[in-house]
Image: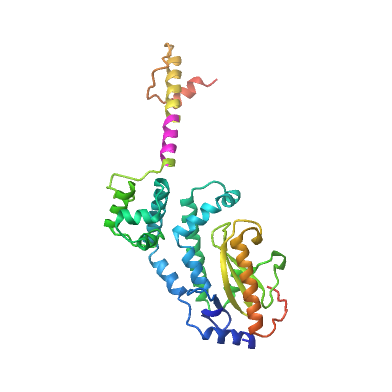
Amino acid sequence: MNIVSIFEHSKACLYAVKYDDNELDALELLQEYWSDSDELRKFFKQYLKDYEAYYGKATIINIVEKTIDDADLLFETLFKLSEDESGKHLIGFFKPLHNKEAGKAYSLQQLKGYGVMSNSFLRVYAIRYGTSYVITGGAIKLTDQMKDRKHTKDELYKLNLVRDYLREKGDEGEFVYLEL
Amino acid sequence: MNNTEEKLKNLAAENPISTWKDKVSYRKENKAWLKKSTRVALRVLDALDHKGWSQSDLARELGVSRQQVSKLVKGQSDFKFSTVSQLEKALNIQLQTILLENEQVMTEEMIQERLKIEITDYHRRWSNTQHYFNLKNQKPNPHLVMAVEPSMEDDYAMAG
């Protein structure tokens, strides 16, 4: 596993994990997957029932087009944040993965960022590391719990893997609560 | 930046910077045609399903490699007119229409909506026609629909 830089400012840095089995980093992989009509179409054909349970009936073409639009907006938002030297907005982008941790922030905390469109099913996952964030991956989340589907369960596994890797590489993560 | 973050920075420094930002810029600059490319890809994939064809079948029909078809259906190709025409012919679908000034695209939903308005209007005019016969003490003709509209004076006439 390697860490690559997305952008680095004095007050906030964004990194992404590059897994051993891939040439692209986690953010590049997400961007490639969320703009690939063929892959997205396969995904939504498989999980159409999950989609319809939340969002109602729709054609696969409409769902895929909506997903690509939402993903483009999400990446453009992250891009804008990369130009923001203050780092304030990047802090706002990521929320604690576990809802019970709302308002709390600590090193090695597992985080999620949402798609931009209202009620978006897109998620970007990351680990907080001081004032830096390390993106571990992302998913199209159509169920309540991440453990409910294999692809979201895999993301949980990656979050744990990267957290442990960072813990190993760095000092032991201090469990410091900050008010957000 | 504390020691831990410094270590993270050093770890990242061992690898080239991500090219993700370049890719976001590219998609933003080319958004208009990429959207069209996505739609073509999705329409082609639907047509393949409909015909029960695999991407390899399409590749054979077009005389191109399976990899080329795989690239086309990702929705990131800047399609040439000739490619679109070949796809239309092979799959027997329409992917492209160039509209003249007096032509417009209508979806099925828009046609249904227009039809609903027409039917409602027809019933209103039928009802007005029958009402007109009534006012004129003539025998109503249910098969006749006239372009009669009640005027304000009719309302006054009927008031009180």
Q: Quadrant of residue B136?
A: top left
For residue B33, side relative to residue A78 (left or right):
left
Please count the marks in the image.
Answer: 0
Q: Residue at x 26, y 56 (%)?
A: B82
How is colour applied across the structure in the image?
rainbow
Q: Is residue B49 magenta?
A: no
Q: Would you say the magenta stretch is mainly helix, strand or loop?
A: helix
Q: Position of residue A166 (x, y in %)?
A: 63, 80
For residue A152, side relative to residue A21 (left or right):
right
For residue B5, side relative to residue B72 (left or right):
right
Q: Nearer the viewer, residue A127 or A160?
A: A160
For residue A119, side relative to residue B57 (left or right):
right
Q: Quadrant of the C terminus of chain B?
A: top right
Q: Is residue A59 above or below residue B14?
A: above
Q: Quadrant of residue A122?
A: bottom right
Q: Position of residue A92 (x, y in %)?
A: 61, 70
Q: Nearer the viewer, residue B23 or A19?
A: A19
Q: Position of residue B75 (x, y in %)?
A: 40, 60
Q: Quadrant of the N terminus of chain B?
A: bottom right
Q: Nearer the viewer, residue B104 or A37?
A: A37
Q: Residue at x 54, y 62 (%)?
A: A116
- The residue stretch that appears in magenta: B110-119
Q: Nearer the viewer, residue B23 or A23?
A: A23
Q: Is residue A137 above or below residue B105?
A: below
